[in-house]
Image: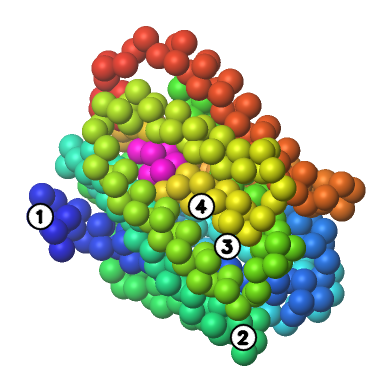
Amino acid sequence: MKGDVSLSKDLRLWRRLALTQALLGPEIFSMAILVIFFVEYAGFSFSVFSTFTASLFVLNWLLEVPAGACADRFGRKKCLIAGNTIYVGAIVLLVVANNHLSLAFVALMYAVGSCLASGTFQATMYEAFAARQATPQFHAVMAEATGLGLWGAALAATVGGWLAGYSLALPLLLDAAALALLTLYLLLRMPSATHRELSAPAEPSLSIRNVLASAWRITLTSPTLCVLFAGLAITFACVRASFNAYQPLMLDTGIPVKYFGAAFCGLVLLGGGVAKLFSKLPKPWLDRGYPELVVIAVFIAGLLPFALMETSPILLLLSVAAHQLVRGIFPSYYSYRINREIPSGTPARTTVLSIANLIRALLTALAVFGIGALAENVDLTTAYRLINTLAIAALIVLVTLSHRSRDNVGTSHPSDN
């Protein structure tokens, strides 16, 4: 592949692993019909779905950092494989869940699986690139993976929408099969240790308590990391909470369910194209935080159709399109910036990333629960507007604070030392 040319053999392997993982990520086939599955197939209300989703993020908030510490202490690959396996089981059980008790058990499985897997691959891959002084290429690969993941999700959403015409359960079962295949591939091909781990045999002896203490110390002594964690959390929470509203709003505006897959395909392809272009962004632009300004501008553009006039299918799809543009920008940007701020050689990298995910999970739980509660008490369109408005305001405050204190642009980063 063309992107492999400038990479060493081991980094080419990591690139292929990253692209494969992005292509076969969770919920790629069910993305376009997941809310409809809950409401029509499983028989739950939208408020129950919102509560279920919020509970996932609350559980993630509770489990994220301990799971990250376990990965740093006992082995990232082991935790990644275990997490993916539990997640596959959760998807299968969700199809047969028929009451609130079984749904709660599924939520716990989802949370345990995602917490064990989150951050482990990214942390290990970053260290492999950092050992080769190739952190700019890390961002390029992550952005490329984001783009490929969105393109794959777009095509999978089309297939999932078609399968949903036969049964709303089929897309979820196909999700489980795809994730199982990915897990097997990672088990066989993912390196168990990075250059750093091989050159520092004493680090595995660190206790979980020491790993946790190190991660929190790194986080709390870095204002830049705190701002980046908040920006990641706000952006993700807005996109994720808004996602819950897309499908009911599409139904309300008269878009038939059979067209959901095709609509999501086109919109997500747009986000994938942006991610591909974003992989070419000059490194100094990333370090100066310019993508944060772009995210704010795109969120505002997505909110304008709702603010100016009544909702229509075209206006709704334009707003969803804006969110897909954001999806194409923020994952690789925050992955690069956060990993750059973590000191090189730390045994707690996964745990620091888990702290970021903890903050993201807490804020997303509040946003998802909030949009569900507002939809029940006011209406879904108003809830959608309010969530997006709050996110824009919070991001503007963050960017203002971060740019005031950004006097050290061009100086060395902790990961460079």
Quadrant into which the C terminus falls: top left
**Sequence order check: which comes first, mark 4 or mark 2?**
2
Residue drawn where x is 57% and y is 62% of the image: 113
**Sequence order check: which comes first, mark 3 or mark 2?**
3
Residue 307 percent across, percent down from the top left: 68, 38
Residue 283 image-quadrant placement: top left
Camera-nearest residue between 34 and 105: 34
Residue 181 tag number: none
- Determine which residue is flagged by label 4: 321
- Give the amino acid type for the residue marked by disc 2 in the picture: Gly
Furthest-right residue in this view: 377
- Determine which residue is flagged by label 1: 5
Relative to 249, residue 138 above or below: above
- Give the amino acid type for the residue marked by disc 1 in the picture: Val
**163 inside magenta stretch:** no
Q: Which of labels 3 and 2 is toward the front?
A: 2
Residue 329 in sight in this render: yes
**Sequence order check: which comes first, mark 1 or mark 2?**
1
From the viewer's perspective, tell me whether residue 335 is left or right of residue 34. left
Residue 381 percent across, percent down from the top left: 75, 49
Q: Secondary structure at mark 2?
A: loop
Q: CA distance from mark 3 to mark 4?
A: 30 Å
Dot 4 crowding, Cα within 10 Å, few <14, some 14–19, many 20+: many
- Give the amino acid type for the residue marked by disc 4 in the picture: Ala
